[in-house]
Image (cartoon, rainbow, N blue to C red):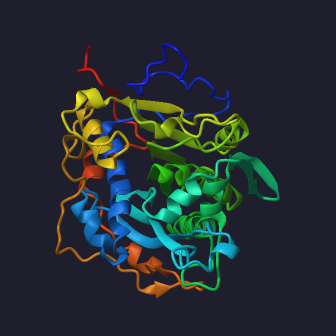
Amino acid sequence: MAGGEDKSSLSAGRGRDEAADHKPPPVVCRAELVRYARMADVAYAAFAGEENLPHLLVEGGVGDYVATTHLYATIDAVLKAFEVFPVLNGVDKPYWFGYVAVARRGGRRWDIAVAWRGSVTVADWMMNVHINLVPFKYGGGAAGKVAEGFYSVYTSSDPSKEHGELSAREQVVGEVLRLVDHFRRQDDHSSQKKKTDVRVTVTGHSLGGALALMSAHDVAAKLAIAGHGDVPVHAVTFGSPHVGDMAFRGALRGKHVGVVRVAVKQDVVPRLPMGDGYVEVGDRVVELDVDRSPLKLGSHNIDLYLHLIGLLRDCNEVSPAASGESSAPADKKRKWPEMKEKSEHGYMRVPLSDLDKLEVTRFEADHDDQNFPNCGHVSNDPCGN
């Protein structure tokens, strides 16, 4: 980071490498950071059983969101010649990697969230070591270069295996577009009337942060092509490694993707890979410090990130989520829409008609912020100091 940059306060000015025409996300409040860190944490928990995802969202303190579909990524880590070895047989396959969820806020805004998990399996770690920069192909060209391993996880597919027909890229872009098209189906695009308010936020921890940046770019690009270029798309990453080069960062800004980067100062992962060409991506940076916590957790642990975020102070915000409470009542008996519809490619999802029945969440009734996190100043110091 540049010397003297204030990384503990997100009410500071523009990022150091920000393009003149790029508008970064506004100031960030702790409630938003807590919310998306919890969603990333739920992505880890759901890996052991995605059928428990609705329950895990409630238990994780984000029960106001309804998961609309699961996301799978196909790992292609083992050379064909080595697949004959029993220990490696079956490593290459689609794995559960995250989910798309939605909440209805303030009666007039749909909040779409995409959450990716980080590395869990040996196959994941096998992909992390492939750090050669390769073109991030999009629309017949390249939007800079990214790490080969991350790109492979994001773009690989295997139609011969269950959940492998589409790449993670195709799944996430298709689901977000399906939701936005539905929420705006009654808008008159030929007039200047205000369109249905929709926001998209992509989040993830570690490898999930890398997937969040790549998918945020693609979601923003696809929405613009589909006539939804006014829908704000943001990424909130926790402990994310470096993903790509300067051109990739420029491509994100060219698509007006605002990035909030959260990293623990003692965590080495956000400084990797260290090869030539890699750059950090983050319009707003929150730096957390292990020394502020008595917990004996690894510096890259998502639980430590959640704990340290909870120690941040918001000067202008008072909300249930900021104090560590759920952003919605955790009603375990509440009946949420279920993934009972199968897409043409075999992926389960919530029928769109069921989403129209969602209730307005309690949090947004109190804090109906129009822009991505826009409810205060996040700082390691007490307000006013």
Question: Which residue is at 32% across, 53% downward?
Answer: 38
Give above or below for 249 relative to 225. above
32 lies above or below 316: below
The percent position of residue 204, horizontal first and vertical second, equals: 45, 52
The tally of labels here is: 0
Image quadrant holding the C terminus, namely top left
283, 89: nearer the viewer: 89
Residue at far right of view:
140
Residue 308 shows in this picture: yes
Residue 287 point in image, percent of width and height = 40, 29
Residue furthest to the front in view is 85
Residue depicted at x 60% and y 55%: 150
Q: Write down the quadrant of residue 32 in the picture.
A: top left
Q: Is residue 3 left or right of residue 47?
A: right
Q: Percent from the top left, x then y, of residue 338?
A: 36, 80
Q: Position of residue 212 (x, y in %)?
A: 53, 52
Query: Compared with residue 12, is residue 282 higher up or lower down, i.e. above or below?
Result: below
Camera-side residue of 30 and 156: 156
Residue sitting at x 46%, y 73%: 69
- Residue 194 shows in this picture: no
Viewed as shown, does residue 100 lie left or right of 36?
A: right
